[in-house]
Amino acid sequence: MIRDLKGMASMYKLLIRFSFRSSMQYRFNFWLGSTIAALIAFVEFALLAVILSRFGTIQGWSVQESAYLYSILILSKAIYRTFASDVHHLEKYLLSGDLDGLLLRPLPVLLVLMTQNVSVRFGETLLGLGMLAYSLSSLAADDQIQLWIAIPLSVLICLNGGLLLFGIGLATAATGFWLTRIDMLQNLTEDATHTAIRYPLSIYPGWLKGILTSILPVAFVNYMPALYIVRGEAGPWMLALSAAASLVVLGAGAFLWKWGISRYQSTGS
Amino acid sequence: MLFFALARASYSRNLQYRASHLLHNIASALFGFIYLSIWTGIGQGRDLGSYGMAGLISYVALNQCLLWVTAFTNYGLGLPQLVRTGGIAIELARPVHLFYNMMSREWGNIGYQFLYKSVPIYLLYLVVIPLRLPHSISTAFAFLAALVCAAYLSLCVQYLIGAVSLWTTESQWLHWLNHAMLTLFSGFLIPIEWLPGWLGWFSRWSFYPYLQYIPTRIYLGMDGISSLLPSLAWCAGLTLLCLAATALMRTKTEVQGG
């Protein structure tokens, strides 16, 4: 079992390296894409910053605290999209019939998809790290947090957030084995939820809070852990709860994937 | 007339998927509810200027409805796909100008999206939120004129993005960048007079406000039909750019394998 996992990990590393080398054959395109991705993330944050600069706080959440929420989201998303790459783009493979080719390879389809068209999200990672550094240093200067505790915990919740977003992405992609077209569902489970958790959860009505903490528990990516790390309004159990949420979502995603791929029927196109 | 034939063909093609598209509206309406929740949460007990809470709610809700006409036009009007398949060579060889050809098809798509996406979400918001109605018939007509200009501007921008795909395989990044810029600079979520410093300056001197901000202000009765004049100037300017881009495409065309 351990040997299998080790073999899988080394295969994953090898495939990632090949994919990265293949994208570096088109250096201009690669750097253009990376730069524009960072610019997009910056523009999206500017929207939040404008609201904060005009209104000061969002339901008691300061600029620094809101920047913390945003930076954790952007870093978690960068981890998910870097390491799971084309899982998000499964629809393209289903519609074109290209998944048939991947099924013939002597490797798990999920592993192959995770290593196709890998794009390291340099711009978003740098932007996220910069915002996290600004947020944590400002909060530490106000004695709201202690850096030596907050930094390692923030790293952990970014990794946990990446796993949780991957779990949701995987579950959504897996529905493609039945529905084929999943862009609408991704619009709901990924785009809409990621937009929602840029802002503190407390601004939303009860029904939306319920969805974001249970059916699609993206609140555990940033808001819930931040209640402990930044606001001190919850105990360390909140981190354990966030980790549990990731495991449940990831488990559900893996189950759906396994079930879905056994039911896969090619579109034949 | 060729324009109507191409537009009708595009409209009819979309019609095949109307059930699926009506479902798509649920996602779009939910996005709108998230934005409305954001403003309801932020705006409670705060000064929202000339809009007031009810006005701002209508502003954000209407902007969400307009997206299907002003923002969600086809990526590059389909040109990137034509470059990829090699079909661009045939399109350029047709005895009709490429811009006119692509524009006509896109009007069919815009017309469909207006009827089957914008209008259902608008009706839902009218009942649920409730979204304000225009003050008068003349306001409604001025708003529709602003909407046509906005759709045309959006179409020109997508054509230019599509034209770029002849020189780089990464034009989809420009598409996403345009979308992000639109979110901030068109006044989609936050009225542009609230944008500080250079952000506000950039927005006022760009075409983005004419996609969302101006049509919505006209609808709410906060601006008159005269505010459309710069929009017409932008339409003329972008048309010239599209024609220049087509001339450049005709000098040398490389396809990606066909």
Image (cartoon, coloured by chain):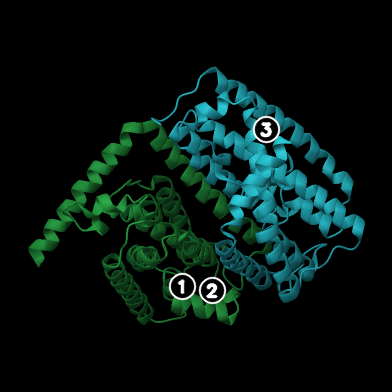
Residue B181 is tagged as none
Residue B100 is tagged as 3
Q: Which of B3/B114 is in front?
A: B3
Q: Which of B220/B84 is in front?
A: B84
Give the labeled residue for mark 2: A201
Give the labeled residue for mark 1: A219
Kindly indicate which chain is depicted in cyan in the rendered structure: B
Residue type at mark 1 is: Ala
Q: Do labels 3 and 1 share a chain?
A: no
Answer yes or no: do the residues labelled 2 and 1 have beta carbons within 8 Å?
yes
At 55% from the left and 44% from the top, the residue drawn is B75
Answer yes or no: do the residues labelled 3 and 1 have beta carbons within 8 Å?
no
What secondary structure is found at the residue carrying circle 1? helix
Q: Is residue B21 above or below residue A36?
A: below
What secondary structure is found at the residue carrying circle 3? helix
Query: Furthest-top residue in view?
Result: B251
Residue type at mark 2 is: Leu
Kindly indicate which chain is depicted in green in the rendered structure: A
Q: How many marks?
A: 3
Residue B193 location (% of width, % of height): 75, 52
